[in-house]
Amino acid sequence: MIDNREAILARLLVVCSEVAGVRNAYRNKVKLSDIDAPYVAIFDADEEGAEDPPARTPRAARRVAMTPQILAVCGAPSNEVGTDVNTLRSRIIDAIMTDATLAGLTLDGQGVRYEGCTTELAMGRDMTAAVGISFSFTYLLRATAA
């Protein structure tokens, strides 16, 4: 099976780790601390197959849209945290949308799509902020002879 899922997720980690202002980038690490901030955490993705034509054979290529969870967390004095998380969000979006290697792993090089974000603020020792950034990555899943 030729499957770009792992390649896309691995590249996404590299891209996010190179964003200005990101101290740490992790993949599938569930125990994270605000001490690590600013950081990006990427969690492996849900996938959904595109609608198939009725005559599709089992080995025919299939369009799949993957939606990994991307969480950006930063901490700053409370009067700056909103601006900081928005700046980090903007840099991450720009890095993902302009990465040629990542685009090349998607369907026709056009399969990177920004879907939106959700934000949260949390009160601790300092005010921290997190933003979940949603992208979909569309690629072809092909079955091959074993």
Image (tube, rainbow, N blue to C red):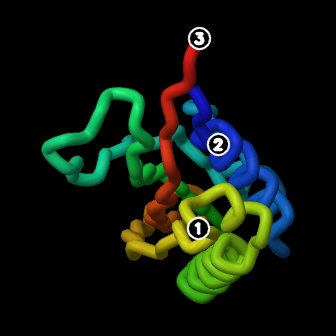
What whole-number distance in Å separates the C-alpha atoms at marks 2 and 1? 38 Å
Q: Amino acid at mark 2?
A: Ser
Looking at the image, which is closer to me, 146 or 121?
Answer: 146
Residue at the image point whose x is 61% and y is 77% from the top: 93
- Is label 3 in a helix, a strand or a loop? loop
Q: Are marks 3 and 1 in contact (CB under 8 Å)?
A: no
Per the image, the residue denoted by label 2 is 33
Label 3: which residue?
Answer: 146
Residue type at numbered disc 1 = Asp
What separation in Å lies between label 3 and label 1 (alpha carbons)? Answer: 26 Å
Quadrant in the picture for residue 107: bottom right
> Dot 3: few (<14), some (14–19), or many (≥20) neighbours within 10 Å?
few
Residue at (84% x, 74% y) in the render: 20
SS of the residue under disc 2: loop
Going from the N terminus, do you reach mark 2 or mark 1 first? 2
Quadrant of the drawing holding the N terminus: top right
Q: Secondary structure at mark 1?
A: helix
Q: Nearer the viewer, mark 3 or mark 1?
A: 3
> In the image, 5: left or right of 16?
left
Q: Mark 2 or mark 3, which is nearer the start of the sequence?
A: 2
Question: Front-most of 30 and 99?
Answer: 99
Alpha carbons under labels 3 and 2: distance apart: 43 Å
Q: Look at discs 2 and 1 and give the one toward the viewer.
A: 1
Q: Earlier in the sequence, mark 3 or mark 1?
A: 1
Q: Which mark is residue 108?
A: 1
- Kindly identify the amino acid type of the residue bearing the numbered disc 3: Ala
Q: Which mark is residue 17?
A: none
- Residue at 51% across / 64% down in the picture? 130
Vertical arrangement, residue 32 with respect to residue 19, above or below:
above
| Residue 126 picture location, percent across and down | 60, 64
